[in-house]
Image (cartoon, grey):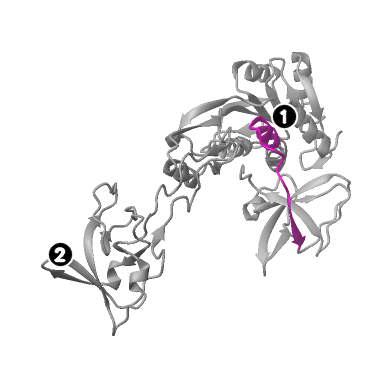
Amino acid sequence: MISYQQAMQLIRDTAKPIPSEDVALERALSRISASEVRSSINLPPFNNSAMDGFAVNSNTTLNASENNPVILQVSDVLPAGSNLDNLVAGEACAIMTGAPVPDCYDAVVQIENVVITTTDTGHQIRLTSPVEQFENMRFAGEDVELNQPILTKGQKIRPQDIMLLAACGISSLQVYSNITIAIATSGEEISDNYDQPLEFGQIYNANAPLLQNLANNIPCEAHYAGIIGDNQHALLEFINQNPQQILITTGAVSMGDWDFIPQTLKQLGAEIIFHKTAIRPGKPILFAILPDGRYFFGLPGNPVSSFVGWRFFVVPLLRALLGLGAEKTSIAIARNQFHKKHKLRQFLKANLLIDDGVAAITINNGQESFKISPLTTSNVWAISLEEQQINSGDKVQFIPLLPDWQ
């Protein structure tokens, strides 16, 4: 049995970065950027108006008041998209939101703040208060400067990132190729027939839907290959008929008479990187490399153990494949105690609350690995280190229940 830190090092040492591919921006959502992206333009690209109104020279309005209004002649109209080639400069210029502000003006007054009159020579505006320099102006590069990084390598692409990339004229980018995963469930007692009553001794399959949906939270293509029972031949078929990069089974990795997966992998010629880690829940977890180089995880069958196996072992492998560093833990203050009778690292269902600006964490009841319901009221995993007994007021490490991939 190895420590959790040793298991993480072995996973990082084993992982080989996956290739990248170019995708159109409209297909980039939730993918992982394979390179840094920098803007090739200023954003905004030019000084422009933040309002519908009139471009003016602010110094001509300094003395404007109710008793001493300033009257300015409007010389031209600038709609959005104007190129200024035929601009007639003057005392003021009508301007629309987003239109470029000519260099001969240094402010925009809102249309609501002027009185417009029509004369024989055109339009005039009447101002009764000064306009501040640069009022209602947006400047070139004020949002993003030329050559500024707008996407980091290893970043999960969000809708707001796509908006920024598009605004900067990026139509495609390099992302890591989707990771393919195949999932199978061991155990003769498992049933996928959710719409049928259970026979005595059966349980519904909770692990496969969990793992499929966890995989869908990142750019993976997850395939559920069904139940392999406690059948060595079915396991071999699963391995041989599913070419995905990562194979995951649940159950049959402990030391019981029906725990056949470790021995089968050895007979197949797989390299067992580790089997059993000093953690709880999920101590019997197995990680292996198949003869063709694919990765294999044997997760324990209890539902919470499978969740822990994914969150604390499969996710680190995925991060390594995607060129991401190790996930960072955060610190919170414990609001209750948790004492254990072992010296294993334990991952605890917990709830994080920001209380008066302080991150406080409550360790939930029901830490047994078969108890699923406490997970539904948890939002983080609290981490009790190998030698740690947690008391109220202690500092406790935690990570989110699900990774954010940033």
* Within-10-Å neighbours for mark 1: few <14, some 14–19, many 20+: many
Above or below for 126 versus 390 = below
Q: Residue 298 carries which label?
A: 1
Q: Mark 2: which amino acid?
A: Gly
Q: Magenta part of the protein: which range?
A: 314-334
Quarter assignment of residue 307 = top right
Q: What element carries label 1?
A: strand
Quarter assignment of residue 236 = top right
Q: Does the magenta stretch include residue 318?
A: yes
Q: Does the magenta stretch include residue 284?
A: no
Q: In this view, does 380 lie to the left or right of 8?
A: left
* Residue corresponding to mark 2: 122
Q: Is residue 156 left or right of residue 45?
A: right
Mark toward the start of the polypeptide (2 vs 1) = 2
Above or below for 141 versus 326 = below
Rendered location of residue 25, percent (x, y): 44, 35
Q: Mark 1: which amino acid?
A: Gly
